[in-house]
Each structure stands twice: as structure tokens, then as C-alpha cells.
């Protein structure tokens, strides 16, 4: 159901996945099972979410071969540093109950600590050892990415950043394209109903007989982003994946472009610390 994009190391990743931020460990297993039943094959978790154990249980209970599911997790800010990162990865893998993850990300650069370069070298080892099929980063700006490109050996496969019609980040997306880094969007619906209530979004959605959320998710796909919507409601989980049977036209894209206002809903990566 979901097309895949090829990462810069040849690994294929679904263009639409299921995010599990703020879903409790008890609730996440049920939510992931609903997602898998709806057709999702990519699950995005993190140490911060405290639900890796539930995600792993759902993956094992899915009945699908492990290679059919793409599992992402992330290293939290307090675990920066080479040796700390290796230990944190071991903990995540143990919590998940898996032999490997498909994608491992540095969750935030935490530039105040200035350790993300040595942390990245730990991820390079994890990749070389075959315990992650691909490695990447999250919430990195161009300056952070440039240091990795200049000082380390492996180009990140993915940068997962806050991205939605009100925060479109064209310069960062251009940098990604130039260096073969896939852009992945968190908060693709901008957290909350303000974006979905915008008249532009409602007009585009009505034009295609879709919901406002489906229109926004389709916009992400048209822009070449990997996207990871999150919900715990089975109906909404199913609705969010029904975005491959229509396309936006150039007028739709131009209309949505007018919503750009630099509106972050999360932290500025240069400012977030431990």
C-alpha cells in the first residue's frame, strides 16, 4: 500500500509511517497493531517515548516477517557521547526485543554539549556492526549537518525535523536534497487543529473529497517528505494512510505554500539542551 523511498545506502523506507509519541507503553501495543492491520509497515519510536517495549511486542505479535516492518528509534539527549550512545543503543534494542533496528537517529543535536560528532561516530559503528540498517539524525539544522559531513565518514540517511505547511523549511530541504539526505516530517499536521482549520487546507481537501488531515499528508508526499502521523484512534489511523489514491495539482501546492509563517510548535534545535 505504501510506496518506499531508497535511502542513500540503498535501504528502502516506507514514505508514510506510524508515530507513537506520547502513547503509553500499555496503549502503544494496541495502537501499533491497529496501524499494522491498516497497512502501515513503518513504526517510529524513541527512548524518550518510553514505549519501546510495547512497540517491540506489537512487532513480534504482528505475524509479519521482521523484514517487512521498518522500525525506527532514537537516542535521547542525556546519552550523547561515544560510549554512552553505544550503551543507550543496547538498552533500546533490549527494550524492543529485536536483533536490529532499521533506522537509528540522534534525537536532538544539543549543541550546548558539543558532543553530537562523537555520538555520530558511535552510530557509524552500530551501522558497521549491522545492528542498524541505516543511521540518521533528528532536529539537525544545516550547521549541525555540515559538521557531520566535514568531520565524519557516513552521510546521515535521514533528518527527521518539524515540518508542516506553517514551517516548510525550504533551505534545509534543499540542503538535504543536495547531499542525499531524506527529509522526514514530525508534527506533520502541526500539532492541534489550527492548521487543519485553515481555509486553504479545507478548500484543497474538499476539492479532492478528502479530510483536511489527508490533504496535508498528501502535500508532504508530493513534496517528497517521509511522514509519520500519530493517532491512537483506529478510524483516524486508517484514515491517515488513505492518501495514495489522489494527487494535488500545482494550484493546490501554490495555495498551501502561502501558509508558511515559520511557526514552530516545538523547540529550536539550537536552544534545546539536556
Image (cartoon, rainbow, N blue to C red):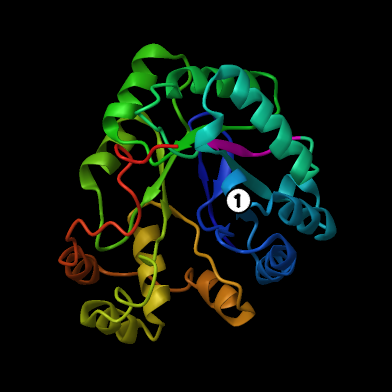
Residue 264 x %, y %: 28, 56
Picture layout, residue 96 above or below residue 228? above
Residue, x 54% and y 69% (percent of image)? 241
Is 72 placed left or right of 66 in the picture? left
Residue 36 x %, y %: 70, 64
Query: Is residue 105 one of those drawn in magenta?
Result: yes
**Residue 158 in sight:** no
Residue, x 39% and y 12% (percent of image)? 151
**Which image quarter is the N terminus in?**
bottom right
Residue, x 50% and y 36% (percent of image)? 77
Is 243 placed left or right of 250 in the picture? right
- Circle 1: element type: loop
Q: Badge 1 local density, few (<14 within 10 Å), some, or many (20+)? A: many
Picture layout, residue 216 above or below residue 226? below
User: According to the image, label 1 marks what residue?
Assistant: 45
Is 28 placed left or right of 72 in the picture? right
Q: Which residues are magenta?
A: 100-106
Q: How many marks?
A: 1
Is 232 placed left or right of 172 in the picture? right
**Which image quarter is the C terminus in?**
top left
Amino acid at each position: 500500500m505504501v510506496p518506499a523511498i531508497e535511502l542513500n545506502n540503498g535501504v528502502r523506507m516506507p514514505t508514510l509511517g506510524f508515530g507513537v509519541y506520547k502513547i503509553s507503553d500499555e496503549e502503544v501495543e494496541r495502537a501499533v497493531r491497529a496501524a499494522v492491520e491498516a497497512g502501515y509497515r513503518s513504526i517510529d519510536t524513541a527512548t524518550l517515548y518510553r514505549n519501546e517495549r510495547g512497540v517491540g511486542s506489537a512487532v513480534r505479535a504482528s505475524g509479519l516477517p521482521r523484514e517487512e516492518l521498518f522500525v525506527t528509534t532514537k537516542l535521547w539527549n542525556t546519552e550523547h557521547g561515544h560510549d554512552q550512545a553505544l550503551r543507550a543503543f543496547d538498552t533500546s534494542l533490549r527494550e524492543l526485543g529485536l536483533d536490529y533496528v532499521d533506522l537509528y537517529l540522534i534525537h536532538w543535536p544539543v549543541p550546548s554539549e558539543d558532543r553530537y560528532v562523537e555520538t555520530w561516530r558511535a552510530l557509524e559503528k552500530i551501522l558497521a556492526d549491522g545492528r542498524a540498517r541505516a543511521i540518521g539524525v533528528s532536529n539537525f539544522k544545516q550547521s549541525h549537518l555540515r559538521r557531520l559531513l566535514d568531520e565524519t565518514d557516513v552521510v546521515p540517511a535521514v533528518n527527521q525535523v518539524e515540518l508542516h505547511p506553517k514551517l516548510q523549511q525550504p533551505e534545509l530541504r534543499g540542503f538535504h536534497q543536495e547531499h542525499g539526505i531524506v527529509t522526514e516530517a514530525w508534527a506533520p499536521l502541526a500539532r492541534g487543529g489550527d492548521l487543519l482549520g485553515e481555509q486553504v487546507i479545507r478548500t484543497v481537501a474538499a476539492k479532492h473529497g478528502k479530510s483536511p488531515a489527508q490533504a496535508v499528508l498528501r502535500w508532504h508526499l508530493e513534496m517528497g517528505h517521509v511522514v509519520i502521523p500519530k493517532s491512537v484512534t483506529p478510524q483516524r489511523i486508517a484514515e491517515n494512510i488513505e492518501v495514495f489514491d489522489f494527487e494535488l495539482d500545482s494550484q493546490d501546492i501554490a495555495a498551501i505554500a502561502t501558509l508558511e509563517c515559520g511557526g514552530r510548535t516545538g523547540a529550536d534545535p539550537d536552544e534545546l539542551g539536556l
